[in-house]
Amino acid sequence: MENKKDFSKLKEKVENYLIDEIEIDESMVKNPDTKLEDMDIDSIDMAELAIQLQEEFDIVLENDPKLQELVTIGDVIEYFKTKLN
């Protein structure tokens, strides 16, 4: 069950980062279909998020080109979820 707990914590961390650090409206962040483009999230924002998650969850993401392919909030959360496993 550890993974489920980690996933919940990871999802919360992603959402909090977008809401607190990038100052995106919570209703947009909580909707998995919201496009990153609609929130003006760029590759620098994604890289900073990845660095925070790497440190906290001990996952490795070194220059993963898949980070550039993420389109929605749901994609971001699913991507990092796969990195937990």
Image: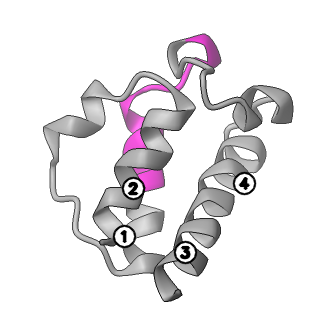
The amino acid type of the residue labelled 3 equals: Lys
Query: At numbered mark 3, what does the secondary structure look like: helix, strand or loop?
Result: helix
> The residue under label 1 is which amino acid type?
Gln
Separation of residues labelled 1 and 4 (CA atoms): 16 Å
Q: Is residue 2 above or below residue 55?
A: below
- Nearer to us of marks 2 and 3 is 3
Q: Which mark is residue 54?
A: 1
Q: At 27% across and 29% down in the image, what residue appears?
A: 68
**Mark-to-mark CA distance, 3 and 4:** 18 Å
Q: Main secondary structure of the magenta part?
A: helix
How far separated are the C-alphas under marks 2 and 1? 10 Å
- Residue 85's spot in the image, x, y percent? 30, 72
Q: Residue 8: within the magenta? A: no
Identify which amino acid the numbered label 2 is placed on. Phe
Q: To which residue does mark 4 refer?
A: 16
Residue at the image point whose x is 30% and y is 73% from the top: 59
Residue at the outermost bottom position: 2
Closer to viewer: mark 2 or mark 1: 2
Residue at image mark 3 = 4
For marks 3 and 4, the one nearer the N-term is: 3
Which residues lie in the magenta part?
38-50
Q: Is the Cβ of the residue at disc 2 closer than 8 Å to that at disc 3?
A: no
**Distance in Å between CA atoms under marks 1 and 3:** 18 Å
Q: What's the mark number on residue 80? A: 2
Q: Secondary structure at mark 4?
A: helix
Above or below, 15 against 55 in this view is above
> Which numbered disc flags the more N-terminal residue, 4 or 2?
4
Vertical placement of 23 versus 3: above or below?
above
Say left or right for 1 vs 83: right
